[in-house]
Image (tube, helix red, strand yellow):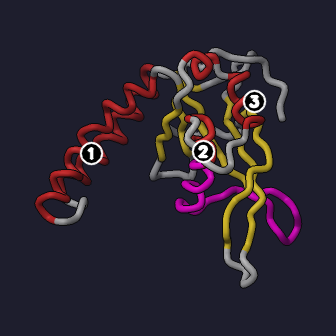
Amino acid sequence: MSNISPVSFKAYIPVRYMAKNPNNDKYVPVLKNENIRKCQSFVVRNLNGTAKNNRDEGFVSFYKSYDRDYRKFPVVHSVYDINNPVVYMVTGEDTDTIRELAKPVGKAKAEALDKLGSSKSYESQYEAKNYIKNVKRFLKNHCARVKDENGEPLTLTVYYNPKYTRDGNLKCFEFAEAEFTVDKQTIPL
């Protein structure tokens, strides 16, 4: 894990997932949306204190040591970007703003479910696109990207060891470690 001095986040951080390739034991990016969501679920459940079986106190302590906003208000919220395999994580009091921006989506889905028996409707899809647009605007204008002491943009990189069933299907991702890495490429918002 990296030795990056604690920063006061008051910002968002991209999260990237890596899984060990069983053929050569090298870590490669996780790219499928369903697998990204499984990996992010570990991060969010642990940091929000809702993990039932696999609470990893070492990961929580590691993260807490870097994010002062999280230490004051230990809540995280994920924002998934449909255009790339990166999750943006917002912590602390900024999560309240993200929740407020999401309310129209929930309301539109509930209305569609009530009227149509399905949460998919023109209105719910419109509100979902509007939500992403508004969240990106909020992050860009009010929540700077987390940077190290040299001003370099950081990414939280989380490493997993995939576990497979006997017939070779992916069973789950087992957390290995996490680190803050200086981002060599620009991640668009």
Q: Position of residue 140 (x, y in %)?
A: 45, 27
Q: Position of residue 95 (x, y in %)?
A: 44, 28
Label 1 – label 3 distance at C-alpha:
33 Å
Task: From the image, tell me which residue sits under label 3.
Answer: 62
Q: Is residue 80 left or right of residue 113?
A: right
Residue at the bottom extreme, as displayed: 167
Of the two numbered discs 2 and 3 on the same chain, state the one appearing first in sequence.
2
* Most foreground residue, 165 or 37: 165
Is there a contact, CB below 8 Å, between mark 1 and mark 3? no
Tag 3 secondary structure: helix
In the rendered image, residue 28 lying in the magenta stretch gets the answer yes
Name the disc covering residue 106, or none: 1
Question: In which quadrant of the rendered view does residue 58 lie?
Answer: top right
Amino acid type, callout 3: Phe
Q: Which residues are magenta?
A: 19-41
* Most foreground residue, 90 or 155: 90
Name the disc covering residue 51, or none: 2
Q: Position of residue 50 (x, y in %)?
A: 55, 41
Relative to 164, residue 87 above or below: above
Residue at the left extreme, as displayed: 115
Residue at 59%, 48% in the rendered image: 40
Question: In which quadrant of the rendered view does residue 105 lie?
Answer: top left
Relative to 157, residue 27 above or below: below
Tag 2 secondary structure: loop
Tag 1 secondary structure: helix
Name the front one of labels 2 and 3: 2
